[in-house]
Amino acid sequence: MNGTVVKNQLVFDFASGLLGPAKSLFASTYLQLNSNASRISSTFENLLGENLMDNENIHPKNLKYTDCIKGENSKSALNTEDPVTRYFGNLNNLNWKQVYKGFKEYTASIDDKDELKLIKMDPGVSVPLHSHGGKEFILVLEGSFCDEYGEYSKGDIQINDQKIKHTPIASRDTGCVCLSITEKDVIFFGKYGSFLNLFTFIKSFFKSK
Amino acid sequence: MEKSHSNNLMSKIQKHRDEMAFSEIFDYFAPKVNAYFIQNSIKFESSEELTQEVLSTVWAKSDLYNSEKSALSTWIFTIARNKKIDFFRKNSKIDFKEEDIREFLYQDREVDLIKENEAKKQIERINDELDEQQKIMIKMNFFENKSHKKIADELEIPLGTVKSKIRLILTRMQKFLR
């Protein structure tokens, strides 16, 4: 599956408001760190704004403009915390779980079908050759790592699925901290895999009613 | 609504809390926002409440709007979308609000946001490249959040065609945005 399509899908779904909490936090961090993704999202929001502009009119029955002018002009204080800090706080104070020497992780307790994790690798540490159960997205927050497919630095996303076997190694100078999403739902592969996955996701999104 | 006119109205609201200017924004956008919620399978009663929340935000947080950063329609769309997300989360009892995160992105991305004048050209380019059916599909899929199956049924075309056409849009987007 084409990585670009998967990444665009993530950005479009975020702009459309289709993502669950875990993926949404992941995507917002991606937009914050990656200016290309941020521009794609911005353009797509403009396109959806155009859709709103050209949308049909369904008039509210019991709503007048006077119902909407009760609030004061409140310039809310500028949010200066990025999404990761807002959710996890200071990463140094987290109760990291050591998986093996030089490799730690912290799993977020978000109520969602996708699992959101932080991963910390010490400089030069490698992960033994492995493949993946479900689809996994890895976003580099600090430092960098490389594997057989290339090097990934701050703001880069790597997408792994069952077909990928790799041996990631953290940079010898900086190590790395990454945010990861593992999809726990049934994962479809093949030509239309990403759309089937999207479909399953949308279904689960509306199922709750 | 012309851009110069909507800018003028917003600036009157920001500077003078001009209620007549707001009533014009309300008359124009409230029915479109209400339709957006209904298109997203939200029942009329709730759609009206959400529309009230959106327009109240436009009034109360008017200072956050910057006409150089985005078109008014984009700003109002993002507010409506955020209300929709919170509405669905609340109904599925997911305790995770993130409007503040999206606000952070909106404020902080100043450098990376596509400037209004540039955005207009880009949208025109995209609209030139896409055929009518693809434009409708973008609206149905990403604005109204309809499944591919539903899109296929409504447009009376095979499901496979919907999937491949939307995939093509995703691939070609990259080219438009360079």
Image: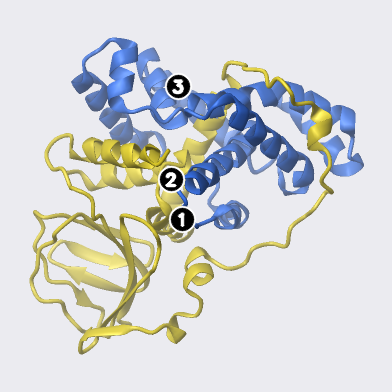
Chain colours: A yellow, B blue
Mark 2 surroundings: few (<14), some (14-19) or many (≥20) residues within 10 A: many
Residue in view at x 22 percent, y 26 percent: B164
Labels 2 and 3 positioned on one and the same chain: no
Q: Position of residue B154 (x, y in %)?
A: 34, 13
Whether tag 2 and tag 1 are in contact, CB under 8 A, the answer is yes
Q: What amino acid does circle 3 point to?
A: Asn
Judged left or right of residue B174, residue A39 is: right
Judged left or right of residue B150, residue A43 is: right
Q: What amino acid does circle 1 point to?
A: Ser
Give SS at disc 2. helix
Residue named by callout 2: A14
Q: Chain of mark 3?
A: B
For the residues marked 3 and 1, what is the alpha-carbon distance in whole angstroms?
27 Å
Give SS at disc 3. helix
Q: Is residue A106 visible?
A: yes
Residue in view at x 79 percent, y 26 percent: A64
Mark 1 surroundings: few (<14), some (14-19) or many (≥20) residues within 10 A: many
Give SS at disc 1. helix
Q: Is residue B22 visible?
A: no
Residue named by callout 3: B127
Residue named by callout 1: A28
Q: Chain of mark 2?
A: A
For the residues marked 2 and 3, what is the alpha-carbon distance in whole angstroms?
21 Å
